[in-house]
C-alpha cells in the first residue's frame, strides 16, 4: 500500500510541474485531469471516500470540462497552441 | 498658478523643446529673408518662399514629435523594466516564503493517526460517540455536514448559487426556441453552435449506454448520502457530469425536448431547493435551541427513511449542484439553457 501511495504522490508532483511547463494548453488540461484522478485515489487510500467521490466528479470531471469550454471560447483549441489559433482566427 | 512640477524632468524637456523650436523658426526666417532679398514682391518667389517655409515647419514638427515619442518610449521601457525586475524579485521572495512556511508547518505536525494530536479534542469525540444517536445517520460525515454543521453547507450551496448568478449576468445570451439569438452581443451564440458535434456515432452510442448509469449512480449517491459515503454535493456533481455528457452527444435539441432544461425551471428549482433548505434548518435550529421535540424523528438507523432532515437536505443540495454544474457548462457554451 505504501508503494502505491508513494508512486501516486510522485505522480502528482510530476504532473503538477508538467501542467505549468507544458506549452500546449490542451495537453496541460488533460495532465491536470490526470492529477485530479490520482488525487482522488489518494483520498481513497487515506480512507475518506466522500472526498474521493467529490474529487473525481468535480476535479477530474466538471472543472476540466469548464477549462475545455473556456479554451474553445478563446480559440485556443483550433491549432496546436494558443497563439497560432488566434492568428488563424484573425486571418478569416 | 504655479505648477508643482515646474522643474520636473518632462517639464524641463518641454521647455527646452519649445525654446528650440522658437530658435529654429528665427533661424528659418533669417535664412529665407537673406536668400530672397532682391525681388521680394515677385509672386513666384513669394509662393516658393511660403512653400519652403511650410516644408521646414513640417520637418521641424516631425522632429519634435519624434523626440517626444523617443523620450516617452525610453521612459516607459525603463520604468517597465524596473517594475518587472521588482515584480520578479517580490514574486520569488513570496514563493520562497510560502514554501518555507508550509514546509515548517508540515514538519511541526504530529504523525498521522497519533492519539495526542490536537485534532482529537472533545468536539470530535462527541461527534463520533453521540453522532449516530443524535442525528440517526450511519455515515458520520453526512451527520456532521448536514446536521451539526448544516449552516456551513447552506453557505456552500449559496456560494454555488452566487457563482451561477454572476455567470448568468456576464454570459447570458437570449435564444429563441430554434436557437437564434434574440438578445446579446453581436456574434454571440453562433460562434459555439458552429463547433457543436453533428451526429457523432461513437459518442452518441456511448452516451446512450453510459448516461442512465451515471445519472442512476448520482441519484444513488444523493439518496444514500446518510448511509454510505457521498451526499448532495458529490452526487449532484456526478449527475451534472452525466447531463453534460448527454448534451455533448445529442446537442441542445436533445435536451430542449424536456421541459426540465429551461431557464425558468432552473430558476424555480434552485430557488425552491435553497428556500426549503433555509426554512427547514430554521425550524430545526428553533426547536433545538428551545428544547422542543422536532416533528421529524431520526427513525431507525440504517433504513433509507431515517436521519431526520438529512435526506431531504441532501436532495436539495444535490439538485442545486447538478443544475449549477449543467448551467455552468451550457452558459459557457452558448449562453442559454
Image: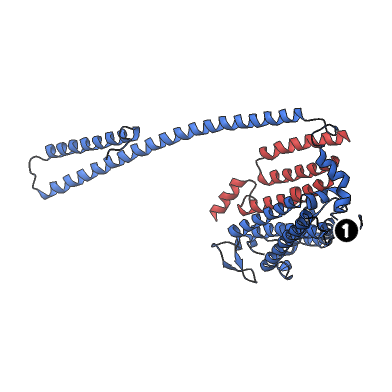
Chain colours: A red, B blue
Relative depth, front residue between A87 and B64: B64
Residue at horizontal 75 percent and vertical 30 percent from the top: B106
Left or right for A90, reference B26 = right
- Closer to the camera, B122 or B228? B122
- Helix or strand or loop: what does disc 1 sit on? loop
* Residue B5 screen position, x and y as percent: 33, 35
The chain carrying label 1 is B
Residue in the picture at 66% in, 54% down: A69
Query: What residue sits right under mark 1 in the picture?
Result: B306
In the rendered view, tell whether residue A23 sits above or below residue B174.
above
Q: Is residue B257 above or below residue B213?
A: below
Corner quadrant of residue B211 = bottom right
Give me the residue at 73% from left, 58% from top: B282
Q: Is residue B289 visible?
A: yes
Q: In the picture shown, does residue B20 fall above or below A83?
A: above
Q: Nearer the viewer, residue B45 or B212?
A: B212
Task: Report the label total.
Answer: 1
Instruction: Please state, as top left, top right, bottom left or bottom right, where the C terminus of chain B lies in the image.
Output: bottom right
Q: Is residue B198 visible?
A: no
Q: Residue A64 location in percent, x, y?
A: 71, 49
Percent coordinates x, y for residue B180 in the rendering: 61, 69
In the image shown, does B58 or B109 lie closer to the viewer? B109
Q: Going by the image, does B45 lie left or right of B14? A: left
Q: What residue is drawn where x is 73% and y is 52%? A: B151
**Residue B222: which quarter of the image?**
bottom right
Amino acid at each position: 500500500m505504501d508503494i502505491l501511495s508513494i508512486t501516486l504522490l510522485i505522480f502528482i508532483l510530476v504532473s503538477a510541474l508538467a501542467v505549468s511547463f507544458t506549452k500546449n494548453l490542451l495537453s496541460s488540461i488533460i495532465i491536470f485531469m490526470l492529477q485530479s484522478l490520482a488525487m482522488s485515489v489518494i483520498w481513497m487510500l487515506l480512507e475518506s471516500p466522500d472526498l474521493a467521490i467529490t474529487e473525481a466528479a468535480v476535479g477530474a470531471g466538471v472543472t476540466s470540462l469548464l477549462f475545455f469550454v473556456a479554451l474553445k471560447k478563446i480559440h485556443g483549441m483550433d491549432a496546436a497552441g494558443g497563439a497560432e489559433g488566434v492568428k488563424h482566427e484573425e486571418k478569416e | 498658478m504655479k505648477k508643482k512640477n515646474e522643474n520636473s524632468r518632462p517639464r524641463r524637456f518641454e521647455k527646452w523643446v519649445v525654446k528650440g523650436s522658437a530658435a529654429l523658426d528665427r533661424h528659418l526666417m533669417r535664412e529665407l529673408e537673406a536668400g530672397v532679398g532682391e525681388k521680394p514682391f515677385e509672386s513666384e518667389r513669394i509662393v516658393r518662399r511660403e512653400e519652403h517655409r511650410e516644408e521646414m515647419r513640417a520637418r521641424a514638427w516631425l522632429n519634435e514629435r519624434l523626440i517626444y515619442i523617443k523620450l516617452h518610449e525610453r521612459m516607459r521601457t525603463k520604468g517597465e523594466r524596473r517594475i518587472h525586475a521588482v515584480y520578479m524579485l517580490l514574486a520569488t521572495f513570496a514563493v520562497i516564503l510560502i514554501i518555507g512556511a508550509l514546509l515548517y508547518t508540515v514538519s511541526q505536525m504530529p504523525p498521522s493517526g497519533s492519539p495526542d494530536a490536537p485534532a482529537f479534542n472533545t468536539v470530535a469525540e462527541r461527534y463520533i460517540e453521540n453522532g449516530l444517536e443524535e442525528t440517526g445517520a450511519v455515515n458520520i460525515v453526512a451527520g456532521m455536514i448536514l446536521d451539526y454543521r448544516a449552516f456551513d453547507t447552506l453557505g456552500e450551496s449559496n456560494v454555488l448559487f452566487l457563482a451561477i448568478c454572476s455567470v448568468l449576468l456576464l454570459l447570458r445570451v437570449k435564444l429563441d426556441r430554434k436557437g437564434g439569438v434574440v438578445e446579446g452581443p453581436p456574434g454571440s451564440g453562433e460562434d459555439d453552435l458552429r463547433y457543436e458535434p453533428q451526429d457523432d456515432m461513437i459518442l452518441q452510442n456511448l452516451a446512450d449506454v453510459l448516461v442512465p448509469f451515471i445519472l442512476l449512480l448520482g441519484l444513488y449517491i444523493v439518496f444514500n448520502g446518510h448511509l454510505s459515503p457521498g451526499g448532495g454535493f458529490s452526487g449532484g456533481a456526478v449527475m451534472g457530469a452525466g447531463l453534460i455528457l448527454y448534451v455533448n452527444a445529442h446537442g441542445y435539441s436533445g435536451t430542449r425536448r424536456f421541459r426540465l432544461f429551461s431557464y425558468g425551471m432552473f430558476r424555480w428549482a434552485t430557488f425552491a431547493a435553497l428556500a426549503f433548505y433555509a426554512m427547514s434548518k430554521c425550524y430545526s435550529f428553533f426547536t433545538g435551541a428551545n428544547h422542543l421535540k422536532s416533528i421529524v424523528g431520526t427513525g431507525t438507523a440504517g433504513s433509507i427513511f431515517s436521519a431526520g432532515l438529512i435526506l431531504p437536505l441532501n436532495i436539495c443540495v444535490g439538485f442545486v449542484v447538478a443544475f449549477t454544474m449543467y448551467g455552468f457548462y451550457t452558459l459557457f457554451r452558448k449562453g442559454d439553457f
